[in-house]
Image (tube, grey):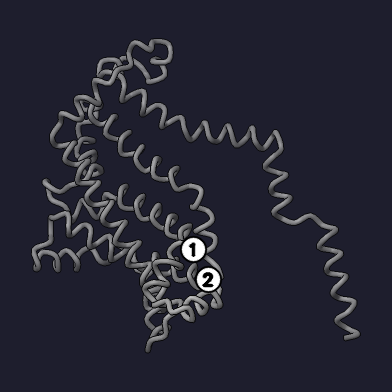
């Protein structure tokens, strides 16, 4: 006791005397110079997006005659004709629909399966639980490129190669390790007393999962959904290999248009902008859960 007593007040005094790192960071970000710098960086990042938007609203002749910034002085160049032509292009419209059919089911399946597995690894006792979880964590280091050829042969043997279902299954398989790891760590932080109280009240594991665990895990689920949706929506490597001409997503369709960039800018620009806008809308819709979910699920 004689050794512990002086150490306690000394540590408390030093902690109170010095500002916390979070407080120092908040004061630093609130300074005028830092805010001005952040505005400049944001404008630099948004400039290509603005250029793509203006290019998608200009005709091919206007795009060929001058840069996109000339539309600021001549707003009459801007119109929605390119987007109208894009919607009438059956190939691009089908590619956009295929992207939705690939991204949405993949995200739902990954989040749903990972939530069940994360809860099982965190709170259910079964033989080999820790060993299986270590295997799942080990799969995080397996590159996607290693599985392309063997999975392509497997899908060809079972008739899934070149279909939307094959692309979805591939993304689900390679998205689950990270998803299970994230949700397991998040669910493990739920107080044990809360779950035990629910069991004492007669709640089954399914009822506890749906009525207690899922509402508490909403930030982690939202952040995982953003990660998975952005990964699948912007993917081109997997779709380029596993999708045929009838099931190719928007990224592959735009890549094929890049071969004739000069003559297809009227289709390429609005298609690329639509491909960029949808992930932005999804991100900003769930942004308030993003940082909280990732930080809470990364460490215990």
49 left or right of 38 in image: left
> What's the distance in space between the residues labelled 1 and 2, CA to CA?
8 Å
Instruction: Name the residue that disc number 2 marks.
Output: 190
Q: Residue at x 24, y 55 (%)?
A: 238
Label 2 environment density (alpha carbons within 10 Å; few <14, some 14–19, many ≥20): some
Q: Is residue 34 above or below residue 136?
A: above
Q: Is residue 270 visible?
A: yes
Label 1 secondary element: helix
Label 2 secondary element: loop
Image quadrant assignment for residue 52: top left
Q: Residue at x 25, y 31 (%)?
A: 268
Q: Are marks 1 and 2 in contact (CB under 8 Å)?
A: yes
Horizontal and vertical percent position of residue 136 = 37, 74
Q: Which of the two residues, 279 or 157, is positioned nearer the viewer here?
A: 279
Q: Is residue 31 above or below residue 229?
A: above
Q: Residue at x 30, y 19 (%)?
A: 58
Horizontal and vertical percent position of residue 220 = 46, 60
186 left or right of 224 in image: right
163 left or right of 270 in image: left
* Label drawn at residue 216: 1
């Amino acid at each position: 006791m004689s050794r512990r007593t002086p150490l306690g007040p000394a540590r408390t005094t030093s902690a109170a005397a010095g500002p916390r790192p979070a407080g120092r960071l908040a004061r630093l970000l609130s300074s005028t110079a830092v805010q001005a710098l952040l505005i400049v960086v944001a404008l630099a990042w948004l400039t290509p997006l603005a250029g793509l938007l203006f290019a998608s609203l200009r005709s091919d002749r206007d795009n060929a005659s001058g840069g996109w910034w000339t539309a600021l002085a001549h707003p009459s160049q801007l119109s929605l004709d390119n987007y109208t032509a894009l919607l009438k292009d059956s190939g691009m419209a089908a590619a956009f629909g295929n992207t939705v059919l690939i991204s949405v089911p993949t995200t739902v399946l990954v989040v749903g399966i990972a939530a069940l597995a994360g809860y099982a690894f965190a709170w259910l006792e079964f033989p080999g639980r820790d060993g299986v979880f270590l295997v799942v964590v080990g799969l995080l280091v397996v590159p996607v490129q290693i599985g392309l050829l063997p999975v392509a042969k497997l899908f060809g043997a079972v008739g899934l190669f070149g279909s939307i279902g094959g692309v979805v299954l591939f993304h689900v398989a390679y998205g689950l390790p990270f998803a299970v790891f994230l949700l397991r760590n998040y669910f493990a932080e739920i107080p044990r007393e809360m779950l035990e109280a629910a069991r004492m009240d007669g709640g089954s594991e399914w009822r506890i999962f749906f009525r207690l665990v899922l509402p508490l895990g909403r930030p982690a689920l939202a952040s995982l959904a953003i990660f998975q949706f952005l990964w699948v929506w912007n993917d081109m490597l997997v779709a380029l290999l596993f999708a045929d001409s009838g099931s190719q997503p928007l990224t592959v369709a735009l890549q094929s248009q890049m071969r004739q960039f000069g003559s297809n800018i009227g289709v390429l620009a609005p298609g690329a902008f639509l491909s960029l806008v949808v992930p932005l809308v999804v991100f900003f819709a769930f942004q308030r859960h993003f940082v909280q979910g990732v930080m809470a699920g990364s460490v215990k």
